[in-house]
Image: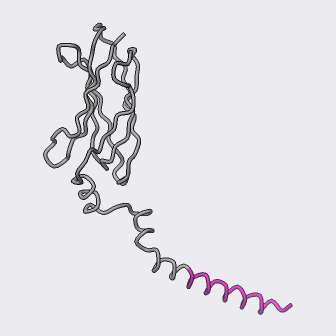
Amino acid sequence: MDIRNIKNINRKNIVLLIILVIALLVLFGGALKNLVIGPSNEQIIKVLEEKGPKLKVETPAAGAKINTEFTVTGKAKVPGQYIRAILRDAQGNILQRQTTRMKERHIDWTGFKIPFTYTGKYRGKAELEVYWLYYRDVSRRDIAKIPVNLE
């Protein structure tokens, strides 16, 4: 076999590969853009302004006994927004507050974790208040109030 023929075959394969890549980009360009670049600001605003709750707290459950170290977990559909959890005593006084930020480019339901390490002296009935902050007016949205027992 002549080496010049191998070079010609390789050139033909490279040209075919380039054509295939261009064709795939044309066909699936929008989906590829969302994978690589992420959703546009318009898509994010649309998700944030949709009706219905965008925050679901999974743990702790209502009435749960919690220690000084616990984690608030759940799912949210609030790309780039802050989720805040506040631990309050029975009188409503703030014992501790923690905040996490959701990833910018996730417009679907995404899990979150907010770890707490409470070092205060209060023990007894308490309440966890979990909500997300809307960036436009910094208002509290989808407020979940969860009664717990702090041991």
Q: Write the start and end of the magenta stretch as one range.
A: 1-20
| 16 magenta-colored | yes
Residue at x-position 36% and y-position 23% = 116
In the rendered view, tell whether residue 34 sits above or below residue 63.
below
Instruction: List x then y, in percent, for residue 19.
Output: 56, 85
Say which quadrant the C terminus sits in.
top left
Q: Residue furthest right?
A: 1
Q: Nearer the viewer, residue 97 or 3?
A: 97
Classify residue 45 by image quadrant: bottom left
Say which quadrant the N terminus sits in.
bottom right
Left or right? Give the position of 151 relative to 126.
Answer: right
How many labels were placed on the picture?
0
Residue at x-position 32% and y-position 18% = 148
The coloring applied to the image is one colour
Classify residue 126 by image quadrant: top left
Instruction: List x then y, in percent, for residue 129.
Output: 25, 27
Instruction: List x then y, in percent, for residue 69.
Output: 40, 18
Left or right? Give the position of 126 relative to 111.
Answer: left
For the stretch drawn in magenta, the main secondary structure is helix
In the rendered view, tell whether residue 20 sits above or below residue 30.
below
Residue at x-position 34% and y-position 61% = 39
| 5 magenta-colored | yes
In the rendered view, tell whether residue 122 sits above or below residue 102.
above
Classify residue 100 by image quadrant: top left
In the rendered view, tell whether residue 62 sits above or below residue 2.
above
Instruction: List x then y, in percent, for residue 101.
Output: 32, 41
Q: Nearer the viewer, residue 1 or 68?
A: 68
Q: Residue furthest left?
A: 137
